[in-house]
Image (spheres, rainbow, N blue to C red):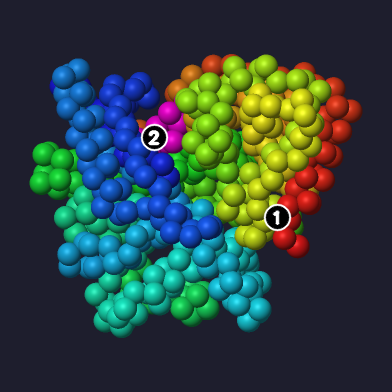
Amino acid sequence: MKDGILAIDQGTTSSRAILFSPEGEVIAVAQQEFPQIYPRPGWVEHDPEVIWATVISTARDALKAGRKAGWRAVCAGITNQRETAIVWDRKSGQAIHNAIVWQDRRTAERCREIDASGAGAEVAAKTGLVLDPYFSATKFAWILDSVDGARERARKGELCFGTVDSFLLWRLTGGKVHATDATNASRTSLYDLRAGRWDDGLLEAFNVPARGLPEVRDCAGAFGKISKKVLGEEIALTGIAGDQQAAAIGQACFAPGEAKSTYGTGAFLLLNTGPEMVASQNRLLSTIAYRIGGETAYAMEGSVLSAGATVQWLRDGLGLFSKASEIEALAASADPDSEVVLVPAFTGLGAPWWDAEARGAILGLTRGAGRAEIAQAALDSTAFQTGDLLTAMAGDGMKTVSLKVDGGMAANDRFLQRLADLTGIEVVRPVNTETTAWGAAFLAALGAGMFQSIEDGRALWKADRAFEPQMNSSERERRNAVWAEAVERVRSR
């Protein structure tokens, strides 16, 4: 049996498991979608037991397929939807409430209250984040306040809370390890990026007790062992990173100025800023790109709340097509002069607006507009939002001339060409588009000693195709101005 690496990729709409070779070749893959829960407008939840069941099922399927092909997993890594919050019983491992998903906006009012108390500046200075329901801290507090007896149980140390990686790690190791990595910790609003620890002042501001939080570790190293009872074999778990940081690692964004954008449910642009944390003046986020060997690399990030989710809405909500892949051909038939604009603020707007109360709209409709024009506007909305992030980063002195892309929408050539046209920069798709899972696998291999340094990942990255801008600058500026006007019309303030 040849030695492979198992990547557990727990995402917002599905769980996946991929067995990789040390060269990044996909040996086996398994995936399961799971339902989203919408208790109220703007609220999004997941059933933690469904998350767990899909993770175990896909991991077992990938391992089984790998064995048939002559491969075994000698180590494993986890990458996960970030900011999604779970609180569970320390003894039984049972969650006391559904997971509150990163998209959820229920704590918007609480964020305003914390800001009004004067804590906003402290949050930004220590965490690199803005005060927004997107992040985990107010989600933890909401669960503790909403479930009978939860606060008292947390005070007694009977509860654990963490992001999805912590929940999975706890269960995979049979309840032996309650830990997270620095990238996931950096998304909670409770972690001081420069000091590298949970911060007492932030814990007090958000009313989250330290006793239930996980230990924060490097992204690569010994996290524990997956119990034989769970997957049928014991596997060393040696790497963890939040999905967007894992994608940046999979895209070999190891030098300052190197950037990637992942197009999944949302879209997330990370730009490596090196060993120095750069504070944004344009409401972007400072975050941890990775921490390895005790050394931290920072990143600047912009978050788009709805990218692939917009395509899903056209498919499931409006019924414009039956498969997401059909949007490329439909958009290609659109009137090229159409000025239909779709602003997908279904759960508010992310960076650089951070407007939790904004709501979506389709503007510029004429009698001649139809399915194709709306489909094109949906693809363009993600490109426009990416352009807004790049403009904000340039305003902070962080400019890139090339953007590496991955995620489900990166398979769409029309979208990538439109992305290049509307942003005015080169867009590069890699040969290996499983960059998020590969980032987790690479970290696991690094933690297990299969690689010697993070730079070993650069030699394994290869470009598939580069998309160069073809739209003239005046047309680009005109279309971006129409987009900017549409955004202003849906803003809540």
Image x and y of residue 37, in percent: 40, 52
- What range is drawn magenta here? 433-441
- Indicate yes or no whether the magenta region holds residue 134: no
State the residue position of label 1: 353
Q: Which quadrant would the C terminus be assigned to in this image?
A: bottom right
Q: Nearer the viewer, mark 2 or mark 1?
A: 1
Residue 484 is situated, as x and y percent measured from the top left of the image, at 80, 44
- Give how far across and how far down residue 321 sits, in percent: 53, 26
Image position of 480 (left or right of 133): right
Compared to 150, does 85 lie above or below?
A: above
Task: Write down the quadrant of residue 485 in the picture.
Answer: top right
Few, some or many C-alpha atoms within 10 Å of disc 1 (few <14, some 14-19, many ≥20)? some
Query: Of the numbered discs in the image, which one, if any, rests on residue 437?
Result: 2
Q: Position of residue 272 (x, y in %)?
A: 59, 43
Dot 1 falls on a residue whose secondary structure is loop
At x 53%, y 58%, the residue is 41
